[in-house]
Image (tube, rainbow, N blue to C red):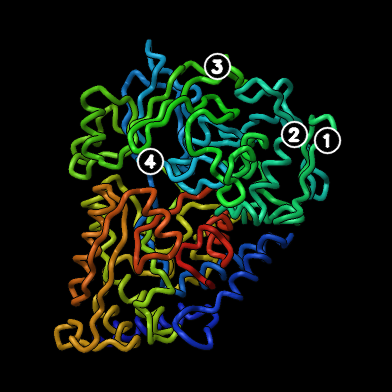
Amino acid sequence: MKKLLALLLALTMVLSFSAFALADEGSEPDWTEYNALISEVKTTTDFAARVEMMHKAEDILMGTGAIVPIYYYNDLYMAKETLSGYYSNPYGTKFFLYANNGDNTTLRLCLASEPDKLDPALNSSVDGATLATASFGGLYTYDAEGNPAPNFATGYEVSEDGLTYTFTMRDGLKWSDGSDLTAKDFEYSWKRAASTATAADYSYMYSSIKGFPDELAVAASEDGKTFTVELVAPCAYMLDLAAFPTFFVVKQSVVEAAPDVATNPGAWALEAGFVSAGPFVLESWTHNQSMVYVKNPNYWDAANVKIERLEFMLSDDDTAIFSAYQNGDLDFIDTVPTDQIASLIGTPEFHVVDELGTYYVIFNVKSKLFDGKTVEQAAAMRKGLSMLIDRQYIIDSVAQTGQQIATSFIPAGMLNGNGGIFKDAASHAYPNGSDGYFAPEVDVEGAVELLKTAGYEFDANNMLSASTPISFEYLTNNTSGHIAIAECVQQDLAAIGVNMTIKSIDWAVFLDERKAGNYDVARNGWIADFNDPINMLEMWTTDSGNNDAQFGR
């Protein structure tokens, strides 16, 4: 009876997860329907229909089996008790401009290793967003309560139809070199970040604006005092966009002075000393070792910035980072070794805060791992492997800070843009009811049945036959927590004879390799940029720079 139930569950999952369009040939899903659906979501004015379309989009996404949710994020960090005034928003960005470190005007931190990109238009990492917030800025920012707050703009007016925003610029804005900063700088910056020539990973976030990508309908007034934005449809998260790093202002003359700017748009920000406009400027950068930011006296709110220096240690060795913190060489860190977490919980310097995001495993749908499979077989294979992962064990033994098991990509608690919570089983028929797309428990028999539908053979003990082996490499970056999770997955898959090897590499290289599709399976995570499901769905369109699964490519 148990085997029959497992078989029925497996067949139900195949049927429930087959919402995506099938390709004529090969193992890759046809992504045309998904792309069109996201475009419709971003242009409709029917907000109830919009919610249903986003559910359909997530059904298509999860139907591929390429996204394997593990847990919904929270964030841990350690801070000396002398440190106050800093804060973090639900999207993972940390703000140190109003920090106070007691009698010390220097703040020593470690957030990550060598940053991938400092140009805010090109950044796509959480640590990079924190660095961008320190040295650049947007029309809006976030306050300590996580709400959008005026920054380089003092406020805005929106037309009655919700399609035109007019931002009023703050008087007396300056670049760090003392030159004037006006709305014309924002017009340049937004058009640059959206353009096909810049090829920013996040350029799709501008698609709510008319004329995207190369005729963006944004304009500064002649006197540079106001900045007008014309939308294709009302956008409830417009202020969140205005506070997001891809929408930060950069100085045209500095950007375009780089000798190879035509082929490398971020070339102007590869070394310290560039002009910026945030509370701090990058004074020195010893690559792969350290960065020093100093207070920008020309920042509009410099009078309230107490810290004179931010000294960053660049490392992804969490043992070395934790040792430096214990020795008093660092005041703030946001990683600790996995084997230290249990002893730190409850101590005054150890903090856990909520975030809106999902930690997941990602399959490259173009991997040779799926050669010879149909679209349905490749999806069944990926889903079968995901059913072997013991998510609760990962939370209890590695993450250890009370994360919630993730069985869908959109995180629990995310709003739906129409007055409710998106992941509400009462309003959407998930394959596993309130559990979402996957049951939270390990299901070996169900996994085996799914893998059989994908063409794999097993012996009487549910071990893969030598005639149909599964072998692949799992890519991750060099921190103990991520490696430990990889080892858990490796052990879980080995239960049926899957051979998974682990490759760990430096952070910046890891980001580039994953983005380029140079992997079979990799660790991944996405912390929302604002509280709306479209942010976690539009990233998977074919042209998105964050489409690491390579859908439609």
Disc 4 versus disc 1: distance between alpha carbons? Answer: 39 Å
User: Disc 2 marks which amino acid?
Assistant: Ala
Relative to 3, does residue 406 appear above or below in the rendering?
above
Tell whether label 2 touches label 4 (CB within 8 Å).
Answer: no
Q: Earlier in the sequence, mark 4 or mark 2?
A: 4
* Callout 4 touching callout 3 (CB < 8 Å): no
Return the residue nearer the eye: 159 or 207.
Answer: 207
Name the residue: 56% across, 39% down. Answer: 268
Most foreground residue, 299 or 385: 299
Q: Earlier in the sequence, mark 2 or mark 1?
A: 2
In front of the other: label 3 or label 1? Answer: 1
Mark 4 element type:
loop
Q: Which residue is mark 1?
A: 221
Q: Which residue is label 3 attached to?
A: 304
Query: Nearer the viewer's eye, disc 4 or disc 2?
Result: 4
Amino acid type, residue under disc 4 in the picture = Glu
Q: How far separated are the C-alphas under marks 4 and 3?
A: 29 Å
